Every structure is written in C-alpha cells, then in structure tokens.
Image (spheres, helix red, strand yellow):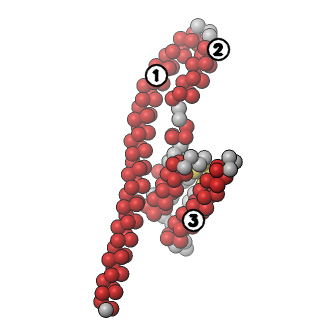
C-alpha cells in the first residue's frame, strides 16, 4: 500500500511539473512570437519611414508646414501602435528564468485583458540575492499581479480607470 502511495505521488508530481513546463513553454513561445512580429513590424516601419520622410521633406522644402504636420500626425495614428510596441518592454533585462516567466505571464494577461500597464526594469537582473527565496519572490510577484489584475478588471467593468505600474530593480 505504501509503495503504491509513493508511486502515485511521484506520478502526480511529474504531471504537475509537466504542466508547469508546458505553461512556461507556451509563455516563452508567445514571447518569441511577439519578438518575431515586432521585428517584422520594425522592418515595415523602417521602409514606410523612408517613404514618409521623403514626402515630408518635399512638404518642408515647399514651406507647407500645415501639410507637413497633418501628414506626420496621420502617419503616427495609422502606423504606430504604441501599446503593441510596449507589451514586453524591458523584459529582456530579466535573466532569471523563473522571474522572467512570471513577468511574461502576467504582462500577457494584462495585455490580453486590455488593462493599461507599465512595466519597467532598467537594470539587468542576473540573480536573486542569497537572502531571498526565489520561489517566495515569484509567488509574491504572481499574487501581487493577480490582485492588481483582478481589481483592474473590476474597475474597468464599472467604467472606471485602471492602470498597473510594475517596476523591478536589481536592489
């Protein structure tokens, strides 16, 4: 009986670990797709920018500043989706896999729920200080983000403003 219980616990643990790995792989796959899409958008933007710049240059040479401003404003509105460009900004500075994974997951959830947010991490995070338990830190960040997301969703349902600010610092 004891042997079967131990064997069953091992199977359950493996299943739990597999589920966790599958979830992390999906999050990293989403991140990779986002990076690929951003690269394509950047390439298209660079091409469009050259054409727009030449058009604006002609308007400027002719002294038509109203047309110049109008064209620039129109281009900005139609071609620059600031929200998409900012989706994973600064995540590249996080080198600790568990921390990066939870941040990507929560930013993806915020983006998918149309919750306005700002994420900032200016310094590279290469390790967790020895006096901090990595799993506890990941749990704290996860719970804090879940609470902020839950409250933001409630505010948005009530047609109120919501905004989440996250900053991670190497200290």
The residue where tag 3 is placed is 143
Q: Which numbered dot is residue 72?
A: none
| Image coordinates for residue 77, horizontal then vertical, percent | 57, 28
Q: Secondary structure at mark 3?
A: helix
Q: Are discs 3 and 2 less than 8 Å apart at CB?
A: no
Q: Which numbered dot is residue 66?
A: 2
Instruction: Give the residue furthest to the front.
Output: 158
Quadrant in which the N terminus is drawn? bottom left
Label 1 to label 2: alpha-carbon separation:
20 Å
| Image coordinates for residue 25, horizontal then vertical, percent | 37, 58
Label 1 to label 3: alpha-carbon separation:
45 Å
- Of the two numbered discs 1 and 3 on the same chain, state the one appearing first in sequence: 1
Q: Which numbered dot is residue 50?
A: 1
On the question of residue 149 being in view, the answer is: yes
Q: Residue at position x 54%, y 16% from top? A: 56
- Of the two numbered discs 1 and 2 on the same chain, state the one appearing first in sequence: 1
Foreground label between 3 and 2: 3
């Amino acid at each position: 009986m004891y042997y079967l219980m131990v064997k069953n616990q091992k199977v359950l643990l493996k299943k739990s670990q597999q589920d966790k790995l599958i979830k992390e792989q999906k999050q990293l796959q989403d991140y990779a797709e986002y990076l690929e899409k951003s690269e394509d958008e950047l390439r298209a933007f660079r091409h469009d920018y050259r054409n727009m710049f030449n058009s604006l240059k002609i308007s400027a040479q002719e002294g038509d500043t109203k047309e110049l401003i109008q064209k620039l404003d129109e281009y900005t509105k139609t071609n620059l989706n600031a929200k998409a460009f900012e989706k994973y900004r600064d995540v590249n500075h996080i080198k600790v896999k568990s921390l990066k994974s939870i941040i990507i997951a929560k930013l993806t959830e915020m983006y998918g729920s149309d919750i306005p947010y700002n994420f900032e991490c200016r310094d590279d995070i290469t390790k967790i200080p020895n006096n901090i338990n990595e799993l506890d830190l990941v749990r704290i960040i996860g719970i804090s983000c879940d609470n902020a997301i839950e409250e933001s969703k409630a505010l948005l349902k009530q047609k109120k403003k919501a905004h989440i600010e996250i900053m991670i610092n190497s200290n």
